[in-house]
Amino acid sequence: MEDLNLYLSFFLEVCDTLNLNGVSSDAIRLRLFPFSLRDKVKAWLHSLPSSCITTSGEFTRAFLAKFFPPSKAASLRNQITNFLQKEDETLYEAWERFKDLLRLYPYHGLHRCMIT
């Protein structure tokens, strides 16, 4: 999936539908996450030492660090802060494109009043 934050959001939504007595939501997420992966992401997971990740939060941080590097984050933040409406683009189309950028990088760090 191209949008890793959306992928994680969908994954957490599915995991939150499961409720097993005596099993924490963190344990459910950690056990199910490998089944949601494929190709190079799954290969990356299997290359990690088995004891290096013990919580779903650690896994999420490692996953985003590997597949959503700081350079990509910086590029998206730059696109958000320097956003301009294209010459042949309607205001609606520009607003939708801007919202897509915000969805791609929800941790942009900009105050809400700066983006609305």
Image (tube, grey):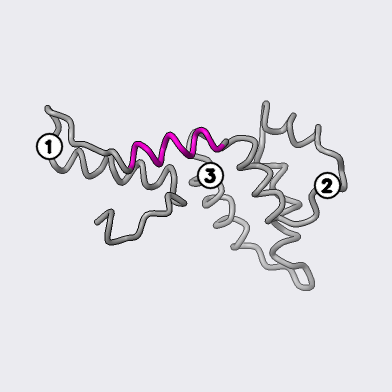
Say which quarter of the image contains residue 48.
top right
Q: Is residue 77 magenta?
A: yes
Check contact, mark 1 vs mark 2: CB within 8 A. Answer: no
Residue 79 spot, x, y in % from top left: 34, 36
Say which quarter of the image contains residue 101.
top left
Q: Earlier in the sequence, mark 1 or mark 3?
A: 3
Q: Which residue is mark 2?
A: 52
In this rendering, the label closer to the viewer, 1 or 3: 1
Q: Nearer the viewer, residue 35 or 3?
A: 3
Residue 46 spot, x, y in % from top left: 80, 34
Q: Nearer the viewer, residue 43 or 86?
A: 86
The vertical placement of 100 against 110, above or below, is above
Amino acid type, residue under disc 3 in the picture: Tyr
Real-space Cα distance between discs 1 and 2? 49 Å
Residue under the image location 19 percent in, 38 percent down: 93
Q: Which residue is mark 1?
A: 90
In this rendering, the label closer to the viewer, 3 or 2: 2
Residue under the image location 24 percent in, 56 percent down: 116
Check contact, mark 1 vs mark 3: CB within 8 A. Answer: no
Amino acid type, residue under disc 2 in the picture: Cys
Which is the main secondary structure of the residues drawn in magenta? helix
Q: Which residue is mark 3?
A: 7
Amino acid type, residue under disc 1 in the picture: Thr
Residue 109 spot, x, y in % from top left: 42, 54
Q: Which residues are magenta?
A: 70-80
User: Could you tell whether 84 is left or right of 19 in the image?
Assistant: left
Secondary element type, mark 1:
loop
